[in-house]
């Protein structure tokens, strides 16, 4: 499948998964891939953490205002004025953080309550309301995502979701509130969010997992829950940090050394053999889990390599987004699984 066609299947792609599986890294890699295909990309970050910016080699602190992480042509990196909601230029990645408090301030300002909104926030009344009506914070944030989606300011809006447990609550809040609220602004905001989440042309989830037992089990469970409880469409599963196949692994270290005419101390040969065994076991486990995932979750897989790097920066991002693009291009395979 063509990369840009893949990226515009839905305007919003929520990247979700268990804690630490590489959601933020995959958001950055997807953004880089989509911008490389000439699309405009907006990354929405929800926790005020710098991971997405770091992957692009930026030390910008992402704020509500947002910043440019990847510029197209001669345009420069730096802050963005989101107030005028200008369209993100093609080939560019911009990122911003959305917090419930900021979203509420903006909501109140949009509804003619700018003067009291700051006072409401500082008085702590929002916390009281949020405590009394669970899910209010989530629909404030998702309501803002919906507004961004409707404004059409970017071809692709990538949302870096909270870890799985919280993602389920985060995405099912709107449905819950819709059932609970009889009328008023909360109900209409919740209804808008439910509409967004249940329309596959507007919003989908890409689950990220690792080729290991627990993450695979959790991804399978999350996928069914997201479909059943939230009614949200699922895109391909991204299997991050796959160990790339290593030629010659099947041959014992001693034999490989002998046929290469290399003599090493016995201690070194033992260490090499231990490393070979470790990698072999790891690859067998990985293969087993990839098969299980394919068997139990009928979704295409995009496999991304584990990079032996101290951290993920721009050059690693190139490799990761290239791997994603290779997987995307192979997606027409009827089995859907990238070899
Ligand atoms: N393919 C990869 N190869 C090597 N390291 C990786 C890869 N993907 C992610 N990492 C590293 O793994 C760590 C966790 O990644 P990341 O922060 O993207 O996960 P996350 O799912 O967003 O975590 P959290 O749930 O805490 O938000 C980071 O240090 C990241 O640099
Ligand atoms: Mg993260």
Image (cartoon, rainbow, N blue to C red):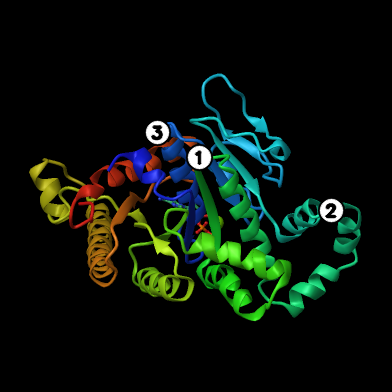
Kindly check if marks 3 and 1 are in contact, taking CB atoms under 8 A apart as contact. no
Q: Please say if 206 is above or below 175.
A: above
Q: Please say if 165 is above or below 305.
A: below
In the picture, measured across the screen, residue 125 lies left or right of residue 312, that is right
Where residue 132 sits in the image (x, y, percent)? Answer: 76, 79
The residue that mark 3 highlights is 37
Q: Can residue 322 be seen in the rendering of this structure?
A: no
Q: Earlier in the sequence, mark 3 or mark 1?
A: 3
Q: Secondary structure at mark 3?
A: loop
Kindly check if marks 2 and 3 are in contact, taking CB atoms under 8 A apart as contact. no
Q: Nearer the viewer, residue 263 or 143?
A: 143
For the image, the number of numbered tags is 3
> Distance between the Cα atoms at labels 3 and 1?
20 Å
Q: Is mark 2 within 8 Å of ligand 2?
A: no
Residue 292 position by quadrant? bottom left
Residue 217 position by quadrant? bottom left
Question: Which residue is outermost to the front?
Answer: 183
Where residue 161 sits in the image (x, y, percent)? Answer: 54, 59
* Mark nearer the viewer, 2 or 1: 2
Residue at position x 23%, y 46% in the image: 330
The residue that mark 1 highlights is 313
Tag on residue 112? 2
Q: Secondary structure at mark 1?
A: loop
Q: Can residue 158 be seen in the rendering of this structure?
A: yes
């Amino acid at each position: 499948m063509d990369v840009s066609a893949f990226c515009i299947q839905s305007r919003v792609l929520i990247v979700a998964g268990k804690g630490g599986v590489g959601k933020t890294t995959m958001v950055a890699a997807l953004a880089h891939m989509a911008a490389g295909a000439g699309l405009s990309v907006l990354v929405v970050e929800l926790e005020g953490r710098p991971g997405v910016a770091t992957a692009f080699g930026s030390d910008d602190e992402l704020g509500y205002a947002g910043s440019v992480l990847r510029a197209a042509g001669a345009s420069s990196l730096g802050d963005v004025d989101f107030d005028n909601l200008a369209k993100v230029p093609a080939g560019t990645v911009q990122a911003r953080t959305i917090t419930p408090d900021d979203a509420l301030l903006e909501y109140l300002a949009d509804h003619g309550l700018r003067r009291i909104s700051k006072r409401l926030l500082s008085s702590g009344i929002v916390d009281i309301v949020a405590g009394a009506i669970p899910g209010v914070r989530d629909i404030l944030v998702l309501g803002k995502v919906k507004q961004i989606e409707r404004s059409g300011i970017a071809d692709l809006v990538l949302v870096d979701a909270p870890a799985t447990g919280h993602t389920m609550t985060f995405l099912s809040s709107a449905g819950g509130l819709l059932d609970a609220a009889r009328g008023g602004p909360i109900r209409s905001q919740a209804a808008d969010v439910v509409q967004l989440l249940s329309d596959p042309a507007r919003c989908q989830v890409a689950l990220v997992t690792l080729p290991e037992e627990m993450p695979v089990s959790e991804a399978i469970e999350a996928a069914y829950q997201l479909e059943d409880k939230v009614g949200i469409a699922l895109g391909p599963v991204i299997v991050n940090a796959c160990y790339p196949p290593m030629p010659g692994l099947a041959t014992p270290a001693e034999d490989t050394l002998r046929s290469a005419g290399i003599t090493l101390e016995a201690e070194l040969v033992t260490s090499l053999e231990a490393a070979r065994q470790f990698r072999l076991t790891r690859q067998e486990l990985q293969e087993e889990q990839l098969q299980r995932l394919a068997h139990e979750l009928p979704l295409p897989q995009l496999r991304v390599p584990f990079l032996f790097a101290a951290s993920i920066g721009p050059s690693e991002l190139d490799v990761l987004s290239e791997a994603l693009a290779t997987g995307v291009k192979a997606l027409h395979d009827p089995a859907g699984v990238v070899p």
